[in-house]
């Protein structure tokens, strides 16, 4: 049976996936609007193309990066051995990225920093490591 902490960690990864997708789609939308405003303001097609291209590039890059937490979340549910280790690496990397906003005490950065720290600490516990190391028995239990 999957421990509750592993299930919560999987759902945390799915929430991260949804947020990254939301940011990626928003960047693409804002890039398109900004390019239209730049064309109206400057009358330049070059600036419009650059802004639209940049918005699409960043948005698509974020959508591709959202595949990482999605794969990790699925790995938790499918009991993949390296999922715990990879999640710990990505949470540590995420904490490094959030270090500067954490110094300035931004609420969302603080919340995500606490959540990533909790996932990191939980996955280091023996219960979580044991879950990924043990083999799932497929044989029926004798009655």
Image: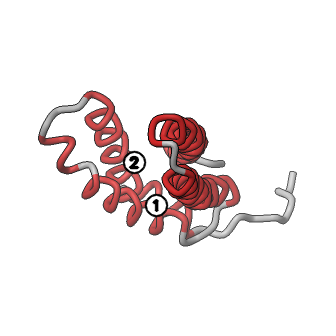
Q: Earlier in the sequence, mark 2 or mark 1?
A: 1
Q: Between residues 69 and 27, which one lies in front from this camera angle?
A: 27
Drawn side of residue 96 relative to residue 77, left or right: left
Q: How is the image coloured?
A: secondary structure
Residue at 54% x, 65% y: name it.
83
Q: Are marks 2 and 1 in contact (CB under 8 Å)?
A: yes
* 18 lies above or below 67: above
Q: Quadrant of residue 7?
A: top right
Residue occupied by mark 1:
87
Q: Position of residue 89 (x, y in %)?
A: 38, 66
x then y, percent, for residue 15: 55, 39
User: Which secondary structure, mark 2?
Assistant: helix
Residue 61 in sight? yes
Disc 1 on helix, strand or loop? helix
**Which residue is more in the foreground, 78 or 40?**
40
CA neighbours of label 2 inside 10 A, class few (<14), some (14 to 19), many (20+): many
* Residue that mark 2 sits on: 119
The residue positioned 33% from the left and 62% from the top of the image is 93
Quarter occupied by residue 124: bottom left
**Most foreground residue, 125 or 143:** 125
* Residue 23 shows up from this direction: no
Residue reaching furthest front?
43
Disc 2 to disc 1, how far (Cα)? Answer: 8 Å
């Amino acid at each position: 049976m999957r421990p509750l902490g592993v299930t919560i960690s999987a759902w945390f990864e799915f929430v991260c996936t949804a947020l990254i997708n939301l940011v990626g789609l928003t960047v693409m939308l804002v890039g398109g609007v900004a390019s239209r405003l730049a064309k109206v303001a400057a009358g330049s097609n070059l600036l419009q193309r650059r802004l639209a291209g940049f918005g699409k590039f960043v948005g698509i890059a974020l959508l591709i990066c959202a595949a990482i937490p999605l794969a990790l979340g699925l790995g938790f549910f499918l009991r993949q051995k390296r999922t715990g280790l990879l999640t710990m690496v990505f949470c540590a990397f995420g904490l490094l990225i959030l270090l500067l906003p954490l110094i300035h005490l931004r609420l969302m950065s603080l919340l995500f920093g606490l959540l990533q720290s909790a996932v990191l600490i939980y996955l280091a516990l023996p219960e979580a490591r044991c879950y990924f190391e043990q083999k799932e028995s497929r044989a029926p239990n004798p009655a």
